[in-house]
């Protein structure tokens, strides 16, 4: 991994919202892996081998008359990443119950305290989708439940699931950097019941009481049938990574497999849905 080079794009956006959220979503579809929201906009990272000079051609918001967006880009060595996060990663507290912080932050007086070294992985709790998934875990019974965290990123949701009493837990991500980062964070938080697996939906073979999938809409739609086939009777499915406009499509696919829609959370047009089997 040491020789991988990332390209970092620095976007300046005015006005900031909802442009930054839309920009990050579109960049994610284009292949960018990681994002840091800044005071002026956002920084986005993509592996150099995945980059091409036309990478931004399909980023529709760059052509919008509603926002002014400018950008610069440069090669970023991975060795610079920890310093970037130390400058930009602020701790968060969700519903006064769960803190997500880096090792260099002071401990919070919350019931759940999670230490994350994010590196190049998605899932610090700052993004709306991760924040809502944390809320779902806080608000539902995970005690003694078997859990799948699909697209685990940093492993933060799997870690919170264990803190809530879940076991066993599988945390899966196809990206090698996320896989390695989740292993590190699982150990850092002294978790004993999480198995981190590198792969996609094709590696699924177990059944679960609860499935968490915080992934983009296209992958959710592609793999939904596989997820649902792994869900135990009376199991819970939590989905996020898409917008309000995507709800009819997601609900239709879930209801086709006889799941019942139960709850919606929404933050800045991002949504998270709960279904029961």
Image (spheres, grey):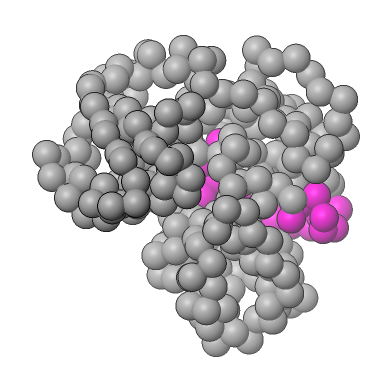
Image quadrant in which you'd find residue 53:
top left
- Above or below for 210 versus 41: below
* In this rendering, position of residue 151 left or right of residue 185: left
Q: Classify the position of the N terminus by image quarter.
A: top left
Image quarter of residue 58 = bottom left
What number of labels is visible?
0
The residue depicted at 54 percent of the width and 73 percent of the height is 247
State the residue in front, 126 or 179. 126
> Is residue 142 covered in magenta?
yes
Magenta segment: 136-154
The image shows residue 209 at horizontal and vertical percentages of 73, 65
Relative height, residue 116 to residue 54 (above, below):
above
Position above or below: 188 against 250: above
Q: Nearer the viewer, residue 175 or 255?
A: 255
The image quadrant where one finds the C terminus is bottom right
The residue depicted at 60 percent of the width and 69 percent of the height is 230
Residue at the image point whose x is 48% and y is 27% from the top: 39
x then y, percent, for residue 216: 45, 57
144 magenta-colored? yes
Q: Position of residue 213 (x, y in %)?
A: 57, 58
Q: Is residue 197 visible?
A: no
Figure quadrant of residue 90: top right
Residue 130 visible here? yes
Is residue 276 placed above or below 205 in the rendered structure? below
Q: Residue at x 47, y 49 (%)?
A: 18
Image coordinates for residue 240, horizontal then vertical, percent: 57, 59
């Amino acid at each position: 991994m040491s020789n991988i080079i990332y390209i970092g794009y620095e976007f300046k956006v005015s006005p900031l919202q909802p442009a930054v959220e839309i920009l990050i979503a579109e960049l994610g579809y284009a292949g960018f892996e990681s994002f840091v929201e800044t005071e002026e906009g956002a920084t986005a990272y993509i592996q150099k081998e995945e980059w091409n000079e036309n990478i931004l051609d399909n980023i529709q918001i760059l052509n919008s008359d509603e926002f002014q967006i400018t950008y610069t880009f440069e090669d970023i060595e991975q060795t610079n990443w920890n310093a970037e996060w130390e400058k930009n990663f602020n701790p968060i507290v969700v519903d006064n119950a769960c803190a997500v912080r880096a090792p260099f932050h002071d401990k919070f007086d919350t019931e759940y305290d999670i230490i994350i070294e994010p590196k190049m992985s998605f899932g610090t709790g700052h993004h709306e989708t991760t924040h809502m998934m944390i809320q779902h875990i806080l608000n539902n019974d995970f005690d003694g439940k078997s859990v799948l965290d699909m697209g685990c990123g940093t492993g933060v949701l799997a870690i919170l699931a264990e803190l809530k009493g879940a076991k066993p837990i599988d945390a899966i991500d196809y990206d090698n950097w996320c896989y390695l980062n989740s292993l590190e964070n699982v150990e850092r938080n002294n978790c004993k019941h999480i198995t981190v697996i590198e792969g996609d939906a094709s590696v699924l073979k177990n059944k679960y009481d609860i499935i968490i999938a915080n992934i983009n809409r296209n992958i959710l739609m592609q793999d939904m049938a596989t997820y649902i086939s792994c869900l135990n009777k009376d199991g819970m499915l939590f989905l996020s990574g898409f917008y309000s406009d995507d709800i009819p499509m997601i609900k239709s696919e879930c209801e086709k497999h006889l799941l019942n829609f139960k709850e919606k959370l929404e933050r800045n047009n991002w949504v998270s849905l709960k279904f029961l089997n």
